[in-house]
Image: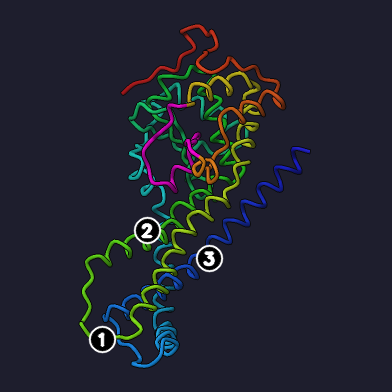
Amino acid sequence: MRAVGLATHIWANNTRSVLLLAGFPVMLVGVIFGIQLILMGVGFLPNSGGTLSQDIALALSMLGATIPLAVIVAGVWFAIAFFGNQAMIDAMTGARKVERATEPQLYNLLENLAISRGLTTPTLRIIERPELNAYASGLREGHYSVTVTRGLMEALDRDEMEAVLAHELTHVINKDVRTMVIASIFAGIITVIAELLFRGLFYVRGSGKDNKNAGPLLLIGFAIALVGFALAVVIRLMLSRTREFVADAGAVELTKNPDAMISALRKVAGRSMLKAPDEVQGMFLDNRKEGFLDGLFATHPSIDKRIEALIRFGGGRDPGPGSESPRPPTTAVPTSV
């Protein structure tokens, strides 16, 4: 049953990735159309001098020139994001690459897990922050990375850290990581464009030429720009929360130690608030926030629900909130700054 479920999960991730990639130029054209209407409303672009429908028709005719530009921009952005996605994510989170010589214990844990699944060992990265979190990133084989915070390394013992690394490696195996990177880097730019548009309009001054349709044009343009923000929500919903349950189960399958995964999640709970753009936070080991709306649009299930699933299906034992499993000090993961 797991094989069928996993195959379906991977197929769904591949489908989401294709939809996001194919939808990017379409979304970009839509945003450009909204910008054209707004610029026409404030007098930066010429208007028809007629009715609202004639102004809209004129804006649509302008798309004949702007669509090729949108395709070129999308192509350039695809190339930049494809080859530079890791650099972008590193800049957003403050992650840095480390080698085996710098963090031998952590590197060996990740390498052993990768070898057990016949994978090239992902690049290891560390964020020098006290928060407890981790994530996997990358778009293709040989370019995947697993990143952990310094706080996570200091708080977790060897078995718990191995479980977290196995969790992130499962995201790589299941193609979750590719979908999440595409969503955060490729589609996230639409939200950025819409936000810049809103902020820029406060400083815009038109040519002064009167346009009797200025009000409706601005309203329609703003409505289209708002779609950029709505798409961010849609994209988050596309990234099913079940991926975390599947990754937790994958960690147990790799390590044969459900207790370590449960204990790691207990330690992470309430200490994972790592600052990063919302799109990138969806990639984290934990990104749970409080409040009704945050819960409604959450990218992750709650820690309690994840632990409940590990107990029910993995046979693990829960030490309880605020508790830590008694482990000898020698099992702690050595860290170096």
Q: CA distance from mark 2 to mark 1?
A: 30 Å
Total numbered badges shown on the rendered structure: 3
286 drawn magenta: yes
Quadrant for residue 218, please give it: bottom left
Mark 3 or 1, nearer chain start: 3
* Looking at the image, residue 54 lies above or below residue 195: below
Q: x and y percent of residue 302 in the render? A: 56, 33
Q: Residues within 10 Å of mark 1 (few under 14, many from 20)?
A: few
Q: CA distance from mark 3 to mark 2?
A: 16 Å
- What type of secondary structure mainly makes up the magenta span? loop
Q: x and y percent of residue 26 in the render? A: 50, 70
- Residue corresponding to mark 3: 23
Q: x and y percent of residue 326 in the render? A: 54, 8
Residue occupying the point 43% across, 54% down: 185
| Magenta stretch bounds | 270-291
Q: Considering depth in this image, is 96 or 31 the residue closer to the camera? A: 31
Going by the image, does 45 lie left or right of 235?
A: left
